[in-house]
Amino acid sequence: MRSPGSGIDRRSDDADTTPTGASVGEHGERRGLRVGACQTPEILGDIGSALGCIEGFARQADEYGVDLLVFPECFVQGYLVDPAHIRDHAFDLRSAAFASVLRRLQPIAQALVIGVIEQQAGRYFNTAAVVTQGRLVGVYRKTHLVPGESLFAPGDTYPTFTARGVRFGVNICYDTQFADAAASVAAQGAHLLLVPAQNMMRRDTAHRWKDEHHRMRAERARETGMWLVSADVTGERDDRIGYGPTSVINPRGEVVAQVPLMTTGIVVADIP
């Protein structure tokens, strides 16, 4: 999938991703940012399979010259807010275990925004890690938590980053229900909001929310004037279903590209 008129072609230049305030050198001709958002299966407690999924999407993204790939919320370990799952699978991002994850991701040319369950100083966070060629550039910790996420501590900052000259920030799933989360990113001059999400819900709830995600995200895009790109899981588990959506919304609040509901795939769009 790609946005209409995005002019997909093959490119070999890599994404340069740096935290707010850092400078980025010029590497050849500059252009807008080509983003790929991945609608994945749900993978729970199998980090090797999750990393294999990231590698598979990265190979697809190579064909389209994608600069940056976005994956769902808590994707590396799987979104399951259960004490045993979190205790057994959370990463201290300074640990040897997470260093091995970074080494595996090093060959990937694209910058990555991947959901992880983070542990630090006895607290757990629902975190999006920004990684480029095996290097941890920075993190965003989800600030707005649903009642069922009481095992997580909330984040309190909204870092922004740049890739290919485009400044971006992150909101995670439920954050998009709150205007302040997107506004805090936009206030730093960001042009793009990335939204890792995980909407594997009980069937009646999933059906009610199937169309609401776009409505809320469109509001955030119109309020801030940012592009919004989301990534979600899809599939079925027990009495739950994940429809998606994984999509691209322009600053006017229009959905310009989307992976079809209930299918895995990647949507690619150019952010000017």
Image: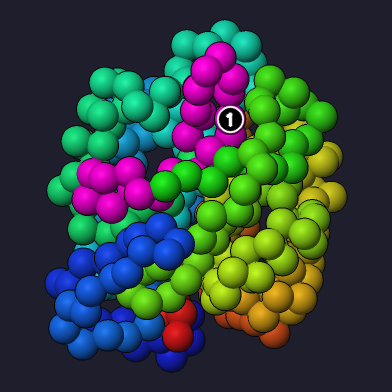
Q: Is residue 160 left or right of residue 31?
A: right
Inspect the magenta stretch and tell me whether residue 132 lies in it: yes
**Looking at the image, which is closer to me, 193 or 215?**
193
Residue 103: which quarter of the image? top left
**Looking at the image, which is closer to me, 39 or 239?**
39
Residue 158 image offset from top left, x and y in percent: 60, 53
Query: Vertical placement of 12 versus 133: above or below?
Result: below
Residue 187: which quarter of the image? bottom right
Query: Vertical placement of 23 versus 32: above or below?
Result: above
Query: Vertical placement of 228 versus 134: above or below?
Result: below
**Looking at the image, which is closer to me, 22 or 131?**
22
For mark 1, what is the residue?
125
Query: In which quadrant is the C terminus drawn?
Result: bottom left
Residue 141 image offset from top left, x and y in percent: 58, 41
Helix, strand or loop at disc 1?
strand
Give the residue type that dot 1 points to.
Phe
Query: Vertical placement of 176 versus 234: above or below?
Result: below
- The magenta segment is 116-137
User: Does residue 207 appear anywhere in the picture?
Assistant: yes
Could you classify mark 1 by the number of other residues whose Cα lies within 10 Å: few (under 14), some (14-19), or many (20 or more)? many
Query: In which quadrant is the N terminus drawn?
Result: bottom left
Residue 50 image offset from top left, x and y in percent: 37, 34
Q: At 40% across and 86% down in the image, what residue appears? A: 6
Identify the main secondary structure in magenta.
strand
